[in-house]
Image: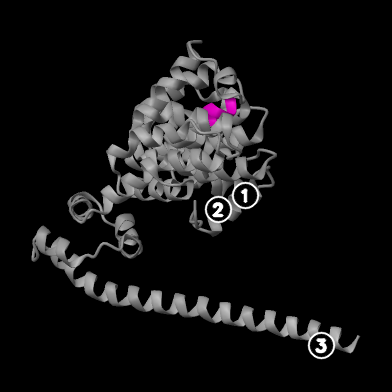
């Protein structure tokens, strides 16, 4: 019995020692990898800066980078995020000349699933168009991770012909949220806007069934597109946004449209009275907020009436629109009265109409 206990103790001690050895080796590996990377970084930084400043030729810069692309990726990813224009193209040429891009293009074609995911991420960052056929194929996968990675890479490359396919893949074969989709499609910048407008117009014309195609609520999907149009402050969206306001009766979509219009900051050729007097207070508040951003004097009397709105935000936005558009005297008059709206008028006047984030 005693021998058995000793055996158990011996095995436990052996396991502990083995674990400690493994942990030590693991940390040593990280330590030496970091040392190697820091040494390479100190070597590469002046070379890269010299190359970008036209002090070093492409051939000279290429000769300074070794073939360990793991370290190259770690070094250049921050620059890929922050450089643009000619500097970005120069860095891309350096990566092409060093064999970095070809290496990851091969990984995308023939590597393991893990290799393909990493390669897609990297080739998206460098905006390498020759990766598109393989990314498009990855987009057809049943793997949610592959679809999201491919969609992000295609968005970074900026290939707008695949916008519809990306949205459809995201909505039908992943669990990604609308917010997540938005964060990826934002990478396109304004390039995506004409494609989104085409989808919206096709939907309004009855040429595309969004519920059938994307297996989701058409209003939520169109609201996503409108959000992206607003984020990009795309003035070319105005006619379509006006048409949506005329033809669609969905509160959430209307709210998103006025948020977009507030960012685009252009007047609309549309009577806003139904929205100023809407039953939904969020619609009312976003409409009067839009009028603060894009003042139209023809609505001043309606905004004066809305200063006493039962909802605080509607009252506040109405007051702000009036204050900043030559109706300060009206607020002063209401503030000293016992009329509804006196409290919000005082609040705005005391702050001088200045509020952070407004």
Residue with the mark numbered 2: 348
Distance of mark 1 from mark 3, alpha carbons? Answer: 81 Å
Q: Residue at position x 18%, y 67% from top? A: 64
Residue 267, placed above or below residue 200: below
Residue 353, placed above or below residue 280: below
Name of the residue lying farthest toward the top: 206
Residue 15 appears left or right of 192:
right
Relative image position of residue 166 (x, y in whole percent): 46, 32
Residue with the mark numbered 1: 344
Distance of mark 1 from mark 2, alpha carbons? Answer: 6 Å
Closer-to-camera residue (88/293): 88
- SS assignment at label 2: helix
Front label number (3 vs 2): 3
Q: Residues within 10 Å of mark 1 (few under 14, many from 20)?
A: many
Span highlighted in magenta in the image: 219-223
Secondary structure predominantly adopted by residues drawn in magenta: helix
Distance of mark 3 from mark 2, alpha carbons? Answer: 81 Å
């Amino acid at each position: 019995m005693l021998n058995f206990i000793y055996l158990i103790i011996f095995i436990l001690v052996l396991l502990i020692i083995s674990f400690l050895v493994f942990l030590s080796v693991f940390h040593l590996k990280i330590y030496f990898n970091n040392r190697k990377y820091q040494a390479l970084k100190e070597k590469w930084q002046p070379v890269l800066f010299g190359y970008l400043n036209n002090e070093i030729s492409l051939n000279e810069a290429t000769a300074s980078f070794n073939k360990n692309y793991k370290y190259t990726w770690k070094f250049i990813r921050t620059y890929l995020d922050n450089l643009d224009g000619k500097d970005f193209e120069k860095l891309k040429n350096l990566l092409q000349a060093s064999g970095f891009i070809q290496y990851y293009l091969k990984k995308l074609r023939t590597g393991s699933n893990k290799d393909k995911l990493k390669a897609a991420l990297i080739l998206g960052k460098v905006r390498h168009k020759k990766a598109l056929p393989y990314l498009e194929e990855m987009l057809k996968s049943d793997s949610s991770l592959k679809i999201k990675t491919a969609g992000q890479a295609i968005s970074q490359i900026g290939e707008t012909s695949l916008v519809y396919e990306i949205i459809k893949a995201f909505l039908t074969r992943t669990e990604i949220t609308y917010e997540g989709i938005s964060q990826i499609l934002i990478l396109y910048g304004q390039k995506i806007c004409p494609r989104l407008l085409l989808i919206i117009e096709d939907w309004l014309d009855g040429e595309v069934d969004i519920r059938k195609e994307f297996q989701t609520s058409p209003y939520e999907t169109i609201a996503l597109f409108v959000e992206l149009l607003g984020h990009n402050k795309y003035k070319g969206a105005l006619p379509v946004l006006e048409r949506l306001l005329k033809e669609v009766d969905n509160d959430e979509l209307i709210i998103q449209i006025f948020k977009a219009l507030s960012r685009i900051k252009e007047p609309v050729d549309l009577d806003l009275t139904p929205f100023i007097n809407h039953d939904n207070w969020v619609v009312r508040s976003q409409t009067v907020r839009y009028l603060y951003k894009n003042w139209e004097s023809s609505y001043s009397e309606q905004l004066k009436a809305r200063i006493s709105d039962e909802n605080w935000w509607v009252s506040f936005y109405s007051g702000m629109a009036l204050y900043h558009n030559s109706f300060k005297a009206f607020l002063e008059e209401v503030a000293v009265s016992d009329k509804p709206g006196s409290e919000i008028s005082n609040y705005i006047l005391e702050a001088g109409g200045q509020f952070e984030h407004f």
